[in-house]
Amino acid sequence: MSKSILITGASSGIGRATAELFLGSGWTVGLLARRADRLEEVANGHRRAIVLAADVTKPLEVETAVAEFATQAGRLDVVFNNAGIFTASGLIDEIPLEDWYASLNVNLSGMFLTARAAFAQMRNQAPIGGRIINNGSIAAHVPRPQSTPYATTKAAITGLTKSLSLDGRAYNIACGQIDIGNARTPMVEDLIARAADADPNAPVMESFAVEDAARSVLHMAELPLEANVQFMTVMATKMPYIGRG
């Protein structure tokens, strides 16, 4: 039996690249996002791809998707807790409250609900255990200007990761966090375009191939449960993260 991974936000960006890499590596992959048609494009008829149309902000949909995937795959070995959004930039008093609540619902509650359902499955399956990989962000440590909702939710994911890692010990559940900086996803390409519009003479934002971020997730997932990458940072080499860059 191949190992199994459930990936949220699998229809685009890092989630899609990760799903395609895991499918190519022989894993059974649960593809979870809201739009089934886009997930079918990712699955591309692959026999080990399981399409799970669900909204990570809705508890019952998440629980049903996790249970369905575990049934079809035989067990749940890994979850890549990846779904997230980046709302429009602005100072805190300019940010619409609906953007704040949307960020909380997807980036934080969505990750909590997915981890909750996965944890329950992993501690009740036989053999017991599994791995949860949370997609944080370097914004958890050094935020972009005018990104309060995103930076706040991503910093909270670090607390979620630590709590899951601690509570999972008794059940052979490992939890780690990957902080990805400027992988070339549609979201980052949009940020690059916004920056160019704001200042056409500014240097182009440094970025790197999303496939390299996916390979980092694969490394974390392939470790035996006795080993864990607690935190990993993978980013564009020249982006201004360390010191003044």
Image (spheres, rainbow, N blue to C red):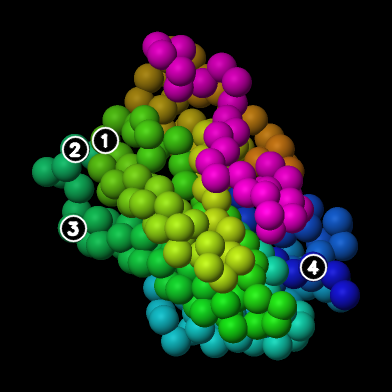
Name the residue beneath numbered marker 4.
3
Name the residue beneath numbered marker 2.
91
Mark 2 neighbour density, 10 Å: few (under 14) some (14–19) many (20 or more): few
- Amino acid type of the residue tagged 1 in the rendering: Gln
Mark 1 neighbour density, 10 Å: few (under 14) some (14–19) many (20 or more): some
Give the image location of residue 95, x and y in percent.
Answer: 20, 48
Label count reads 4
Distance from label 3 to label 2 (Cα)?
12 Å
Residue 188 located within the stretch drawn in magenta: no
Residue mark closest to the camera, 3 vs 4: 4
Residue situated in front as seen by the camera: 162 or 214? 162
Residue mark closest to the camera, 1 vs 4: 4
Distance from label 3 to label 4 (Cα)?
41 Å
Apparent side of residue 211 relative to residue 46 in the rendered image (left or right): left
Question: What SS does tag 4 mark?
Answer: loop
Apparent side of residue 97 relative to residue 127 in the rendered image (left or right): left
Distance from label 3 to label 1 (Cα)?
14 Å
- Amino acid type of the residue tagged 4 in the rendering: Lys
Determine if residue 223 is in view.
yes
Apparent side of residue 73 relative to residue 119 in the rendered image (left or right): right
Give the image location of residue 219, x and y in percent.
Answer: 73, 46
Q: With respect to residue 127, does 163 lie above or below?
A: above
- Amino acid type of the residue tagged 3 in the rendering: Leu
What residue is rendered at 51% in x and 21% in y? 239
